[in-house]
Amino acid sequence: MYKKTVQQKLNEMTDKLNELAEEFEENRSRVETVARESIADTVFLVLKAYKIDIDIEEAIRNRDW
């Protein structure tokens, strides 16, 4: 049950980041590779710290960045 709720929140977070990436593009910029990797690493570490068994690729599956 909690995995579904956590995944829903991760989807919401990823959707917001996608919107932010679009805003960057509209202003002739982009979310840099280091930032994208940092976001993924942080999500991974949070999942690991709280022992939530969701694969990182599944966790941020909605990403466009």
Image (cartoon, grey):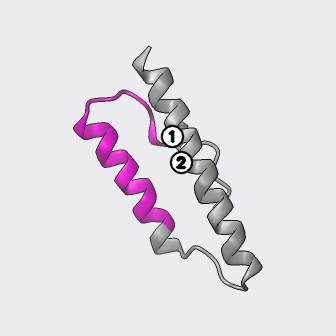
Residue at 58%, 73% (x, y): give it: 31
Residue 11 lies within the magenta run: no
Q: Residues within 10 Å of mark 1 (few under 14, many from 20)?
A: some
Residue 2, x across and y down, in percent: 41, 20
**Residue 22 left/right relative to 15:** right
Quarter of the rendering containing residue 65: bottom right
What secondary structure is the magenta-colored segment mainly? helix
Do the residues bearing badges 1 and 2 touch, measured as CB atoms within 8 Å? yes
Relative to 39, say whether 25 is above or below.
Answer: below
Quarter that holds the N terminus: top left
Residue 51 lies within the magenta run: yes
Range shown magenta: 36-57
Relative to 7, say whether 22 is above or below.
Answer: below
**Amino acid bearing label 2:** Met
Residue at 23%, 39% (x, y): give it: 49
Quarter of the rendering containing residue 29: bottom right
Q: Where is mark 2, residue-wise? A: 13
Residue 24, x across and y down, in percent: 66, 76
Question: The residue tagged with tag 2: helix, strand or loop?
Answer: helix
**Amino acid bearing label 1:** Leu
Relative to 20, say whether 52 is above or below.
Answer: above
Question: The residue tagged with tag 1: helix, strand or loop?
Answer: helix
Q: CA distance from mark 1 to mark 2?
A: 5 Å
Residue 40, x across and y down, in percent: 44, 55
Q: Residues within 10 Å of mark 2 (few under 14, many from 20)?
A: some
Q: Where is mark 1, residue-wise? A: 10
Residue at 68%, 56% (x, y): give it: 64
